[in-house]
């Protein structure tokens, strides 16, 4: 019998059933993958349960896709043990995400010369829960002029938590009165004030390893309508910058599964939010792009496991800063140089040629799956679990139409490659 290796992908899940079922369905159809030396690899997945673990207990999965540890800390600590003790491959490593909230990400990308809107961090509004606070604050907290800071940034401006996420505590502020009200309400949250970018387009880029989908996002729409299906909504230059910025941010921090939000004005790209450890991959919001995302998760996981890619622990920020400090390079040249480092990190070229050689059937089988009864059942059950009875028919038609559109575009794409 040929030499066979078995790889286990562990899924750490919260309440979602949609992408996880899609992932399991696609992975089970992929079948064994043969590597360059002729060795056969079998890749299976399992939903991980939460239980006591000893620090020297073996970790069974070779790779873990995490959608839980950002709010449930027992599995987060298990992931850290898996990263440090067992070298398990993680999407994503909790280390980078715990230390790199939105604020650090702004600082780092500012250092690289990306267009970060002017941003100020103001001290806590309310006393923090610590015996020493009263003394320390009385002695060292300088009074400051909130109005003057806001005047410098200009109205309207945004006030939002330094570690943001889920639109918690975000407000758009148009006047002095609302500025003071929002600051009073911020309570124990630590807040940024940020200049508003008046944008033409809001681009949301979902990245999985070296794959990136830049989507036309409409934050003011209800969830099921936020992503518009429009393929050429950015100029070629802005589109390329969005891909580059997303991949550079991810390579810089060692993130593999992340979404970046960028405001685009003409050809200028302003990243405003790009530390989303657990990006949205719900069928009911991604719709047209859902199958792309799950396929990318399967493809990248298979590549990492079969090629025995080493998990990222060290960040090589200095290499990026050396480019940032090179005065001979302008913005475009720097972005190109960062992207070259990012592509080296993600092995982008090797990834695509490896996929063409070792997973040649993936695109066809995904298309077949999404056009068949298994996906229809998944969609129906997802809609039933998400919407009240009187809205289900409308949403079934909405999502079936959009995913069907993806399938017909994908089918045309595959035919044009034949
Ligand atoms: N500087 C800015 N200029 C213009 N709009 C902004 C700016 N900052 C934030 N916004 C708007 O506010 C929304 C929420 O801000 P942000 O993404 O920073 O917070 P968040 O809590 O991470 O939200 P989410 O988790 O939904 O992405 C953005 O989607 C955007 O519409
Ligand atoms: Mg955001």
Image (spheres, rainbow, N blue to C red):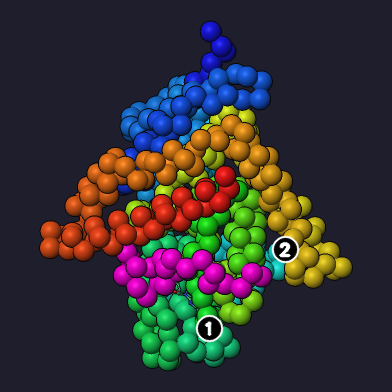
What residue sits 61% from the left and 25% below the top? 35
In depth, the one of 406 and 81 nearer the eye is: 406
Residue 42 location (% of width, % of height):
49, 23
Dot 2: within a 10 Å radius of its alpha carbon, few (fewer than 14), some, or many (20 or more) residues?
many
Q: What secondary structure prevails in the magenta region? A: loop
Picture quarter with the C terminus: top right
What residue sits 56% from the left and 55% below the top? 212
Is residue 353 shown left or right of residue 28?
right
According to the picture, the residue beneath numbered tag 1 turns out to be 198
Q: Which residues are magenta?
A: 217-237
Establish if 252 lies above or below 8.
below
Residue 18 location (% of width, % of height):
32, 46
The residues bearing labels 2 and 1 have C-alpha atoms spaced at a distance of 23 Å
Establish if 112 lies above or below 298.
below
Q: Is residue 96 visible?
A: no
The quadrant holding residue 37 is: top right
Q: Secondary structure at mark 1?
A: loop
In depth, the one of 363 and 266 nearer the eye is: 363
Check if residue 226 falls in the magenta segment: yes
The label shown at residue 335 is 2
What residue sits 64% from the left and 69% below the top? 236
């Amino acid at each position: 019998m040929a030499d066979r290796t078995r790889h286990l992908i562990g899924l750490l899940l919260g309440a979602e059933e949609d992408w996880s079922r899609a992932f399991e369905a696609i992975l089970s159809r992929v079948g064994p993958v043969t590597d360059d030396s002729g060795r056969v690899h079998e890749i299976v997945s399992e939903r991980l349960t939460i239980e006591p673990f000893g620090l020297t207990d073996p970790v069974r999965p070779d790779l873990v896709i995490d959608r839980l540890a950002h709010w449930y800390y027992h599995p987060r600590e298990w992931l850290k043990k898996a990263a440090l003790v067992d070298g398990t491959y993680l999407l994503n490593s909790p280390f980078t995400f715990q230390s790199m909230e939105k604020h650090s990400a702004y600082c780092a990308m500012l250092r690289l010369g990306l267009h970060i809107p002017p941003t100020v961090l103001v001290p806590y509004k309310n006393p923090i829960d610590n015996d020493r606070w009263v003394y320390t604050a009385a002695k060292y907290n300088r009074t400051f002029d909130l109005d003057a800071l806001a005047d410098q940034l200009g109205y309207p401006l945004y006030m939002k938590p330094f570690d943001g996420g889920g639109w918690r505590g975000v407000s758009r502020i148009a006047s002095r009165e609302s500025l003071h009200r929002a600051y009073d309400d911020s309570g124990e949250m630590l807040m940024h004030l940020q200049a508003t970018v008046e944008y033409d387009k809001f681009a949301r880029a979902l990245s999985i390893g070296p794959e990136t989908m830049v989507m036309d996002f409409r934050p003011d729409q209800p969830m099921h309508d936020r992503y518009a299906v429009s393929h050429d909504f950015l100029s070629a230059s802005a589109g390329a910058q969005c891909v580059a910025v997303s991949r550079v941010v991810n390579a810089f921090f060692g993130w593999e599964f992340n979404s970046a939000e960028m405001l685009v004005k003409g050809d200028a790209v302003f990243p405003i939010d790009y530390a989303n450890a657990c990006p949205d991959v719900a069928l009911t919001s991604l719709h047209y792009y859902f199958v792309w995302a799950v396929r990318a998760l399967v493809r990248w996981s298979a590549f990492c496991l079969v090629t025995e890619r080493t998990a990222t622990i060290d960040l090589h920020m200095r290499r990026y800063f050396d480019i940032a400090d090179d005065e001979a390079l302008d913005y475009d040249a720097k972005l190109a140089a960062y992207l070259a480092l990012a592509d080296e990190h993600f092995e982008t070229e090797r990834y695509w040629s490896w996929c063409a050689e070792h997973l040649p059937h993936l695109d066809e089988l995904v298309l077949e799956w999404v056009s068949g009864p298994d996906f229809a059942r998944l969609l129906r059950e997802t809609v039933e679990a998400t919407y009240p009875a009187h809205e289900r028919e409308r949403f079934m038609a909405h999502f079936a139409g959009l995913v069907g559109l993806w399938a017909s575009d994908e089918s045309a794409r595959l035919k044009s490659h034949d």
